[in-house]
Amino acid sequence: MAYQKTGRRMGEAHHNAKLTVEQVVEIYLSREKQEYLASIYKVRQGTINSIKTGKRWKHLTSKLEKDG
């Protein structure tokens, strides 16, 4: 379970999480359009953008490498 330094839960352990670790990895590595991904995962396009740019789920996406 991931925690911030303040003791708050992060990622799918957070009570408001709508995505799993596996889904975030798929989103981050996907080459599909953000609007399409948002409709598939039932989240806003801004959420997808935040994952892809590393603003959200940084504790996970910073460890991943994008292709090309």
Image: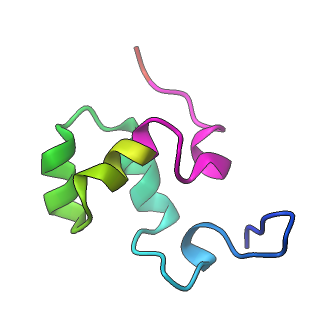
Q: Quadrant of residue 28?
A: top left
Inspect the magenta stretch and tell me whether residue 55 lies in it: yes
- The residue positioned 25% from the left and 60% from the top of the image is 44
Q: Is residue 19 left or right of residue 10?
A: left
Inspect the magenta stretch and tell me whether residue 6 lies in it: no
Q: Residue furthest top?
A: 68
- The residue positioned 24% from the left and 64% from the top of the image is 41
Please state the horizontal and vertical placement of residue 52, each as a whole percent of the image.
Answer: 41, 39
Please state the horizontal and vertical placement of residue 48, each as a whole percent of the image.
Answer: 33, 49
Quadrant of the frame with the C terminus: top left
Q: Residue furthest bottom?
A: 15
Placement of 18 over or under 63, stated as above or below = below
Please state the horizontal and vertical placement of residue 62, each as a whole percent of the image.
Answer: 64, 37
Number of marks drawn = 0
Q: Is residue 25 left or right of residue 42?
A: right
Placement of 51 over or under 17, stated as above or below = above
Quadrant of the frame with the N terminus: bottom right
Q: Is residue 23 left or right of residue 59?
A: left
Placement of 67 over or under 61, stated as above or below = above
Q: Which residues are the magenta region?
A: 51-66
Describe the colour scheme in one phrase.
Answer: rainbow
- The residue positioned 44% from the left and 55% from the top of the image is 24
Q: Quadrant of residue 2?
A: bottom right
Q: Nearer the viewer, residue 36 or 8?
A: 8
Q: Main secondary structure of the magenta part?
A: loop
